[in-house]
Image (cartoon, rainbow, N blue to C red):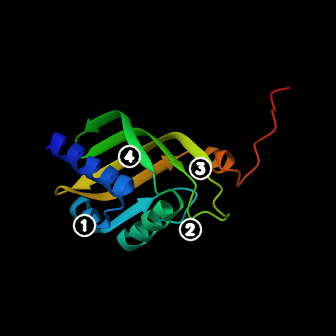
Amino acid sequence: MTEELKGKYHLFTDVWNTGNLSLLAEIFSADAVYHMPPFPDMNLDALGHFVAGFRKAFPDFHVTFDEEIIAGDTTVHRWTWQGTFTGESPVIPAPPNGKHMSGPGCSVVHWSAGKAVEAWHHGDWLGALQQIGVIPPLENVSS
């Protein structure tokens, strides 16, 4: 079962990488909760809208895996993402500017009966928004 869960989560990267939202129903239970701070918790419909809006802003968005851990019905996935801000989207509060972003992230997914029932998605949103110029860089506070 553990390799099956890992494979199902890899389908989720296909959702992010290609925008194929039809895969969501294969991966998540109908009542799944997707946590992605700082955004509000999402159900499957909201998650699909978020991914679609995000891919409008970053049509070349791509996720790759760096490390995975499986423990019972929980999987942990450390990943790296990248994309170029070339499209208008309600997800990003700024006009596209062609800037590239990349960064780390990690997901913790809880599974039941072969479907994800809860997922915690932690990505470097601050770093991403700084890289594309939506938020200014932080001052060096070590001095």
Q: CA distance from mark 1 to mark 3?
A: 26 Å
Q: Secondary structure at mark 1?
A: helix
**Residue 33, position in %: x, y?**
38, 64
Residue picked out by circle 4: 108
64 to 19, vertically: above or below: above
Identify the residue shown where x is 54% and y is 41%: 102
Q: Amino acid at mark 3?
A: Trp
Residue picked out by circle 2: 89
132 to 139, vertically: above or below: below
Q: Amino acid at mark 4?
A: Val
Q: CA distance from mark 1 to mark 4?
A: 18 Å
Indicate left or right for 1 with 53 as reference.
Answer: left
Residue picked out by circle 1: 25
Whether label 1 touches label 3, CB < 8 Å = no
Q: Quadrant of residue 72?
A: top left
Q: Secondary structure at mark 2?
A: loop
Q: Earlier in the sequence, mark 2 or mark 4?
A: 2
Say which of marks 1 and 4 sits in front.
Answer: 1
For mark 3, does the 10 Å Cα neighbourhood hold few (<14), some (14 to 19), or many (20 or more) residues?
A: some
> Which quarter of the rendered picture does the C terminus lie within?
top right
Q: CA distance from mark 2 to mark 1?
A: 24 Å
Q: Earlier in the sequence, mark 1 or mark 3?
A: 1
Q: Earlier in the sequence, mark 3 or mark 2?
A: 2
Indicate left or right for 64 with 25 as reference.
Answer: right
Q: Amino acid at mark 1?
A: Ala
Residue picked out by circle 3: 125
Q: CA distance from mark 2 to mark 4?
A: 27 Å
Q: Amino acid at mark 2?
A: Ser
Q: Earlier in the sequence, mark 1 or mark 4?
A: 1
